[in-house]
Image (spheres, grey):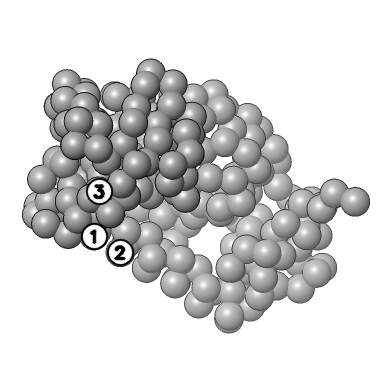
Amino acid sequence: MPETFAEKLAKDDVFSHLSTRDHEELARLAFQTSYHKGQYISMQDDTWNRALYIKSGKLGWVMLSPDGKRQVVFRMGAGRVVWGHTLFDGEPMPAALEVMEDCEVCMWEGDAIMPILSRNVDAVWAITRTLVVTMRKVRDVVYGFAFHPVAGRLANLLLNHYKDIEGQAAPRDLTLDEMAHTVGTTRELVSKTLHQFAGEGMIEISRVEITFTDRGKLEELIDE
């Protein structure tokens, strides 16, 4: 028998601290909507007083510079809960929430979800931990830009995005532009570096597939 939405919420790090009645109330209060790849759910500097649960697809936190450049900080997939920073301090969002793959989400207004969470101290602490983890991920991205060359950043992206596929072909679902936006470089340099990886026997790559042939060498690039 398929899981209900309330049962899925019970598995989340934050919502797991709430009661079954709370899960059912949250499921009732959520409204479902869908988005297409390339849309923005919230723009950087918007006041976004909401939270959402990703039912399918992928979202990404993206930072936009004044001159129009964009940097993908990290991506989130199905089963993740996204908390709007505005919920906690009333201030504008520090990054944009962009749709990376067509998705369906269940969303809550702040004045609907926060009273339920506030009734449980453990849930509040769990939100704090979630936000701290997010901050540490951003720190790792900034650290990577400061100290890792493009090859190391690209190797890290490949290893984290295409997990556990040693010797097996996986669909190549990241475009050159998406890779470039994530590692902070140009699509031309990404293409050149991918061909370098292939030439040195680390990967096999085509327009539609990628295969890891030596993960160890890619991992060494990250540690350099």
Residue 27 visible here: yes
Q: CA distance from mark 2 to mark 3?
A: 23 Å
Mark 3 near mark 1, Cβ–Cβ under 8 Å? Answer: no
Which residue in the structure is indicated by mark 1? 139
The part of the image, by quadrant, that contains residue 188 is top left
Q: What amino acid does circle 2 point to?
A: Arg
Residue 104, percent from left and from top: 64, 35
Q: Marks 3 and 1: which is nearer the front?
A: 3
Question: Dividing the image into 4 quarters, which one contains the C terminus?
Answer: bottom left
Secondary structure type for disc 2: helix
Residue name at image x 19 percent, y 55 percent: 220
Mark 3, residues whose alpha carbon is within 10 Å: few (<14), some, or many (≥20)?
many
Q: Earlier in the sequence, mark 3 or mark 1?
A: 1
Secondary structure type for disc 1: helix
Which residue in the structure is indicated by mark 2? 136
Q: CA distance from mark 2 to mark 1?
A: 5 Å
Q: Does residue 152 appear left or right of residue 34 in this picture?
A: left
From what the image shows, is residue 214 above or below residue 112?
above
Q: What amino acid does circle 1 point to?
A: Arg
Mark 2 near mark 1, Cβ–Cβ under 8 Å? Answer: yes
Q: Marks 2 and 3: which is nearer the front?
A: 3
Q: Which mark is residue 218?
A: 3
Q: CA distance from mark 3 to mark 1?
A: 22 Å
Mark 1, residues whose alpha carbon is within 10 Å: few (<14), some, or many (≥20)?
few
Secondary structure type for disc 3: helix
